[in-house]
Amino acid sequence: MPPRAAPATAPSLDDFYDLDALYTPEERMIRDSVRDFVRSEIVPSVADWWREDAFPADLPRRFGEMGMLGVTLPESFGGAEASYTAYGLINRELEYADSGMRSFVSVQSSLVMYPIHRYGSEELQRRWLPSLASGEAVGCFGLTEPDAGSDPGAMRTRARKVGDAYVLNGVKRWITNGSRAQVAVVWARDEETGDILGFAVDTATEGFQALDIKTKASMRASVTSELYLDDVIVPANDKLDVTGLKGALSCLNQARFGIAYGVLGAAQACFDEVSAYVADRPSFGEPLAAKQIVQESLADMLGGITKGSLLAYRLGRLKEQGGDRPARVSLAKRDNVRTALAVARAARELLGGNGITTEYASIRHMLNLETVATYEGTDTVHTLILGREITGTSAF
């Protein structure tokens, strides 16, 4: 008989299928440094920030110092030239604390730095990317409008060519970082051609105004604004070299990738919290953890997080090989957000009455995830993208 293998150690509940072994040493180093920072510097305070509707002004620079902004970009522009898997893992660690933390980094990296790097002139890249990477400058992404969310082609913001500049007029809504931004990537329809154009707009330009939305019951540790553009003059050299919605959608594809990783951090935080809670909480003479229904719920949570982690890992490697087709990203964004919401809701329920207070993290994560399920493409939109992929027929 062959020799019996040594008994395996119990798998970690935050990496049940040992994905850690598949990451490169650099990816593990980046993840671990961000994890240490998030657990020590963000987690102890983020619930207070959420309750106070606050995003501390020093966070962008601190994120920049940690190398979390534009991490996949070339070093010459302030990036680290790290893998997309490393970027995904950063998002996961940030969202363990709060979706607002991940949202800031996601917008800065995927929706602002990415289009400036991919579609901007050399001068535009030199002007903005290093300061965005360091966190000295903040960016925002102006696509969604009050009457054009899931249908960006219906946008009303207009760009009119006047000499060597464009004049922009319109309103954008639900803009993360809007009132903090020094540069806004704004999408507008050319009045003459009808084409969708992108611009890197200096927010100090006359006619640009950002007002914060203060009625949120979600993503409260994140700045969300409306942008008003009233005859904002943008030099033609600050127009991005891309025409049509494909430019904006390519940015969203980057952000959706980060979300597919990030939401698993929120799910893990809820799972960790409720696992510890039910182990200590007595019920009818024994810990809640001894109840079959509780164990079933925990098993479902672990299964969902593990499957989502495998999905995100594979998507990361596909992206690094050029295989991140939009429908693949839609599947990961949709299904992992569904998983994270299910975990957060189940954790909140197991916490009982305590679960409705922000002394525990699960309800905060649950409320945040309602926003994550809506932005960067709603669950329905991603379902229809997949339906089109399956049938070859568009239903929207």
Image: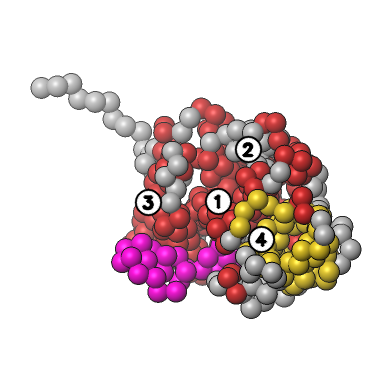
Instruction: Depth check: give the residue in front, 218 or 335.
Output: 335
Q: State the mark number for residue 197.
A: 4
- Report the amino acid beneath label 4: Leu
Dot 2: what SS? loop
Residue bearing mark 2 = 73
Count of numbered circles in the view: 4
Name the N-terminal-most of marks 2 and 1.
2
Q: Farthest bottom residue? A: 147
Q: Position of residue 321 (x, y in %)?
A: 43, 38
Q: In whole angstroms, how far apart are the C-alphas of marks 3 and 1?
A: 21 Å
Residue 19 in the image, given as x and y percentages of width and height: 41, 38
Q: Earlier in the sequence, mark 4 or mark 3?
A: 4
Q: CA distance from mark 2 to mark 4?
A: 23 Å
Query: How far, Cα to Cα, is label 4 from label 3?
Result: 39 Å
Which residues lie in the magenta part?
A: 367-396
Give the image location of residue 389, x and y in percent.
36, 62
Disc 1: CA contacts within 10 A as few (<14), some (14-19) or many (>=20) = many
Amino acid on which the number 2 mark rests in the picture: Leu
Quadrant into which the N terminus falls = top left
Residue 307 badge: 3
Which sits earlier in the primary sequence, circle 4 or circle 1?
4
Which residue is drawn at the image coordinates 53% and 36% (left, top)?
Answer: 83
Residue 254's label in the rendered image is 1
Q: Residue at x 42, y 45 (%)?
A: 323
- Left or right of 266? Residue 187 is right
Left or right of 154, for residue 276 = left
Image quarter of residue 248: bottom right
